[in-house]
Image (spheres, rainbow, N blue to C red):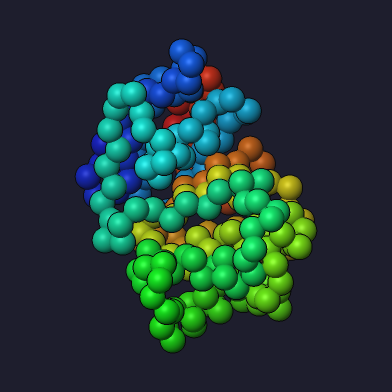
Amino acid sequence: MTAILDISSLAAHEIYVSYDGAAALSGVSASFSPATVTAISGGNGSGKSTLLGVLAGTISPQSGRVHRATTTGLPALVVQRSAAGDTLPLTVGEVVSMGRWADRGMWRRLSAADRDAVGSCLRTMGILHLADRPLGSLSGGQRQRALVAQGLARRADVLLLDEATAGVDAEALDLIVTALRAEAERGATVVHTSHEKAVLSEADSVLRLERGRVVTPS
């Protein structure tokens, strides 16, 4: 990874974000290549989630620019499981099916190919047997698997995940890390935030943030 804007990939250039006058990101530049897994690391308050939100397009920087060279529109974003409410009246299967909405639209019925894709992602995350369960009835680790499966179902050029492996058991950790590698192998640009050494060691490169600045690009 470099700090140079690369028009062939996902890239951020001189990103500044502040909240209530406090800087969250201060001049962050980085580029992310297709067919790779990049981990964004750093402690709490380092700016990891903010940078991910900027890359996803859910956070608008005060200055700087983001370039996304994709054929599938906006990136697929997997949020932390705490962002998925316990009271959502959706089954696991319905949550994962939402990953196909970018292609089909909210009101169009899923095609056979869409249903196959959803089933494949449920199997990849080891939760096919939970497809009819309400999302709110799942354990935290199971819910995280469902959210990752939703992101996988997008089949996007860019997959972004916020602390997808935090607090999950060893089985879920292995499934998620394996799925991220498979996404990169199909050509996707995969970027995720983490502070876990075991997860960081599986990434192709690590971008470390500290107080909103890049300290160890690799």
Q: Residue furthest bottom?
A: 112
Q: Residue furthest top?
A: 21
Q: Where is 29 relative to 124, above or below?
A: above
Q: Residue furthest left?
A: 7
Q: Where is 176 relative to 200, above or below?
A: below
> Residue 155: which quarter of the image?
bottom left
Residue 127 percent location from the top left of the image:
68, 72
Task: Name the residue nearer the viewer: 198 or 27.
Answer: 27
Question: Is 169 on the left-hand or right-hand side of 131?
Answer: right
Q: Where is 198 relative to 207, above or below?
A: below
Task: Name the residue nearer the viewer: 164 or 103.
Answer: 103
Residue 148 percent location from the top left of the image:
57, 60
Task: Name the residue nearer the viewer: 208 or 201.
Answer: 208
Residue 62 percent location from the top left of the image:
34, 23
Q: From the image, which quarter does the N terminus lie in?
A: top left
Q: From the image, which quarter does the C terminus lie in?
A: top left
> Residue 130: which quarter of the image?
bottom right
> Residue 4: which quarter of the image?
top left
Q: Residue at x 41, y 67 (%)?
A: 106
Residue 192 percent location from the top left of the image:
52, 46
Q: Residue at x 40, y 45 (%)?
A: 56
Question: Is 130 on the left-hand or right-hand side of 99?
Answer: right
Question: Is 79 on the left-hand or right-hand side of 13?
Answer: right
Tell me, yes or no, if residue 1 can be seen here. Answer: no
Tally of numbered discs: 0
Tell me, yes or no, if residue 90 can be seen here. Answer: yes
Q: Residue at x 52, y 36 (%)?
A: 49
Q: Residue at x 30, y 24 (%)?
A: 63
